[in-house]
Amino acid sequence: MGEVQRNLFEPEFNRSVKVQGTDQRLTSNSGVVLLREADHRLELIDSIALKVQDPRRPDRIRYQINELIRERVFAMAIGCSAQDDLDRLAHDPAFRAAVWDRNGDQVVHERLASQPTQSRLISILTRSAANLEALRDGLARGVESHVIASGGRRVAHATIDIDSFPIEVHGKQHGAAYNGYYKQTVYHPLVASLSVGGDYDSAQNGKRLGNGFIHATLRQGQVHTANGMQRFVDKTDAKAHTIAQHVDYRLDAGYTIPAVMDALTSKNRRFTGRLKTNPKLDALAAEHIVRPPGRPPAGGYEYTVELGSYQIDTWQHAQRLILVVVDQPDSKTGQLNLMPRWFFLVTNWPQESRSADDLLAHYRKRGTFEDRLGEFNESIGVHLSSQAFKANEATMLLAMLAFNLNTICRNELEDSVGGGWDMQRFILFVLKVGGEMIKHSRRLVLRIAESAEPLWSKLIARLKGWQSRASQGVKASGFMPPPDHAHLSEVLRN
């Protein structure tokens, strides 16, 4: 049969241009094949699916759990976070080839799961605490697999950043509430991110790659920023030590609470955090807030002061206290402010191991982690629209898995070609690539746009350099008959 072409319109700006529709297997999401290759080599989604208890009858299953998770994660990875997007992506040839866990060229003819089936996936993931924990454990598992694949063993040292962020909602979702700090109706999740060597930059002078979210939990919108922090740190610490031999922590002022600092010190875990100021601390700093005589330099002053050992009644252990004075000119007038600004760092690092200036520089790298949270919101854009709290938590964890998978591939690309790639740029130029799927001699050939070929070549070379892991997944054989609505271009719902 010949190719079917349908004329859509001829633009008035240039009559030589004609827009047609075609029945060829075209795609604008060729990059999902790269994501599948990375997922296959790391055994990421298969390892999660093996731990999920599926209540469905095996003889009636068309879509395996790993295929359902893979479809949702890949959709989120290219920025399609709404479940309704899956109805269109289910017909994408590259998506079909990447998601199906079957061999052969038949995969491009088989429709993927629709939005209602994906809703049932969320129900399966939330039917038991074990299923949800299997999904949550997949975060650390993916980072661990990447570290092992790129180096063969755990890294020597890694840093954990912990923070919360708001996810705005617009309905009556369970647990969502107005937060006075953010002045929005939100969920208030808590997340932990790991970076090898304390640096999120992929070009780390020979240090191994490895960073991403390793633990996360969804919380109600009105809770305090440190709510559940001690338990969260305990679980994060256990996950982090499967990736690194030694781990230290960077904490914002909201998390330097006595229970957390004492627990980390008792476990001999190093931490650096910002301490909330109070009149007693300001009195200690007063004698050090001075300006030297003479004309100030163009950039102003910045210096650190060791204040020695410090302990209050609610602390079981004394901690090292550092004063940081920032006396910089106003960006508009160029003049120094009337009074310098200052803040305090609290740490259990010995002075002989790290100086005050080193700790300040180390703490400021936490800003890159906060940028990553912004990237997650902008590029993945998780929408928590389910009424049930656990369903929204499962959706958030799937989105974080997608972000981690993108981060792994982006870091490998950055380390290969150099330069910085923000997540949206990576999605646009590496994943959202035009292509054509051609069947030839029982093989599927994906022809991609020429502009993407150099980047793909670099990234594929990096993926091939990973050390392989023993396959844990069991491939499904054959296809169950498709649902009655499989012939539709999208599922129609009232």
Image (spheres, rainbow, N blue to C red):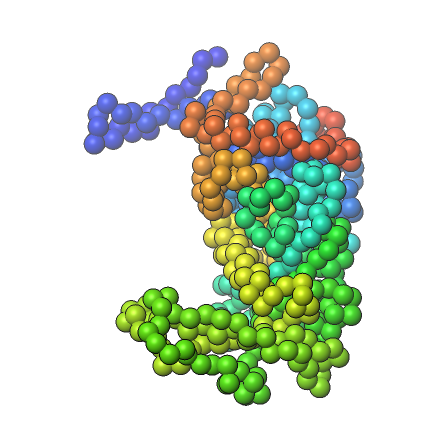
Q: Nearer the viewer, residue 282 or 110?
A: 282
Instruction: Residue 442: tell me if it is visible.
Output: yes
* 415 vs 336: above or below: above
Where, by quadrant of the figure, is residue 411 drawn? Answer: top right
Instruction: Residue 225: tell me if it is visible.
Output: no
* 293 vs 173: above or below: below
The residue located at (57%, 46%) in the rendering is 204
- Residue 271 lies left or right of residue 363; in this view the side is right
Where, by quadrant of the figure, is residue 239 drawn? Answer: bottom right
Residue 379 position in % (x across, y down): 49, 49
Residue 449 position in % (x across, y down): 44, 26
Q: Nearer the viewer, residue 298 or 461?
A: 298
Where, by quadrant of the figure, is residue 301 drawn? Answer: bottom left
Q: Nearer the viewer, residue 432 or 363?
A: 363
- Residue 261 lies left or right of residue 334; in this view the side is right
- Residue 306 lies left or right of residue 56; in this view the side is left
The residue located at (59%, 25%) in the rendering is 109
Residue 156 position in % (x across, y down): 71, 50
- Residue 105 lies left or right of residue 420; in this view the side is right
The residue located at (49%, 71%) in the rendering is 303
Q: Nearer the viewer, residue 430 or 109?
A: 430
Q: Residue furthest front?
A: 294
Residue 418 position in % (x across, y down): 49, 39
The residue located at (41%, 79%) in the rendering is 291
